[in-house]
Amino acid sequence: MATIGKVSPEEMQQFYENSRQAGLTPAWMGRGHDRKPSVEPFVWRWAQAEPLILRSGEVVTPDRDVERRVLRLTNPAREHGTTHTISAALQLLLPGETAPAHRHTPTAIRWVLHGEGAYTTVEGDKCYMERGDLILTPSWTWHDHNNEGDGPMIWLDGLDTPLVHNLEATFYEAFPEDQQPVTSSGQSEKKYASGALRPAWEDYKSPYSPLWHYKWERTYDALWRLAQTDCSPFDDVAMEFSDPASGGPVLRTMSCWIQLIRPGVRTRAHRHTSSAVFHVFQGEGYTVIDGQRFDWSTGDFFVVPTWAWHEFANESSEETILFSIQDIPVMKSLSLYRDEAYEENSGHQPITSRFDG
């Protein structure tokens, strides 16, 4: 509360009223610095989501009106978005269907969950989708999805739409036809997937990775090899998908991780100013977030808000694999990224409650 100066309480009140009418707000009013998180930790159960995403195939068809058959993972603390910077959603494409070509300023990733025979075309490059593949559709790149297989295709969409909307930089354009012309098949994967090697004659300066398709076989092989040599006390065996041209994150606004929690491991807790959306690709375990235990198993999704203490545990005899979308690149580019280790109780939080959905 502001200290009243050389004016009466009545004059002070009149000053505030005059300021309000002029569209001005005294900065000394309500200067509290308490953080009020706009994101809650939460788990979305695959057992509940799968029947609904399959049922959506009978409810709507992707066309120029619907465009994408999508169910968003909406955070209970928000009207839109899975976090304040990331929107995650489940997309279904049935045999013979096309999700029409378009482009937009929000950046997107596709993490393939189920099915085969479908492909995403990115700037004319045809990328066939298989379980565990990561496909990028960077900002303002033409992309469409097509299913040539005989079964449903389901993948996780991750977009930076909450961030782009808040920056009021959202633009969209539809391609003249439902499908863009295919000019190559798997070209980005053939040229750049070797990781440490790239074409010597190219001086690639694009703001996003030239590799748009990260295949599961290469991903798991790299993860397994790292598990033989090193690990993180906070994330166990964790790897970031990287831009082969720069060595940095695959996108300017989002990074993607693949993470192995080995049997019997409980990591130490830490917190950071970035937020993350996780998919349980394989296995089971739990995450302790600010003292609350969140159990999860194959197919589930969960969110870790910014600056929340969190740790991972796998009490089973089988390995657990997590995929995640994180907004670390934004925080680092603005010099706002910071992290902190939990120092008490050997790095483990006391569990005070359990999430029951």
Image: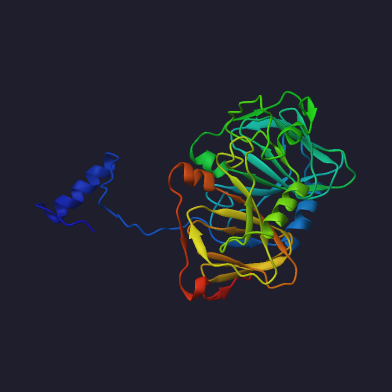
Image coords of residue 167 (percent x, y): 48, 38
Indicate the quadrant where residue 104 lies: top right
Q: Let me know if residue 325 appears in the view.
A: yes
Residue at horizontal 71%, vertical 63%?
320
Residue 227 horizontal side relative to residue 11, left or right: right
Residue 261 horizontal side relative to residue 121, left or right: left
Residue at horizontal 66%, vertical 27%?
200
Residue 129 horizontal side relative to residue 289, left or right: right
Indicate the quadrant where residue 30 lies: bottom left
Q: Residue furthest right?
A: 150
Image coords of residue 141 (percent x, y): 66, 30
Indicate the quadrant where residue 192 lies: top right
User: Considering only vertical position in the picture, is 8 above or below 124?
Assistant: below
Closer to the camera, 322 or 37? 322
- Where does the C terminus fall, quadrant-wise? bottom right
Residue at horizontal 76%, vertical 25%?
177
- Colouring chosen for the image of the structure: rainbow
How many marks the image carries: the answer is 0
User: Considering only vertical position in the picture, is 317 above or below 48?
Assistant: below
Image coords of residue 206 (percent x, y): 59, 29
Q: Residue furthest left?
A: 6
- Where does the N terminus fall, quadrant-wise? bottom left
User: Considering only vertical position in the picture, is 139 above or below 155?
Assistant: above
Image coords of residue 140 (percent x, y): 62, 30
Closer to the camera, 299 or 210? 210
Q: Let me know if residue 182 appears in the view.
A: no
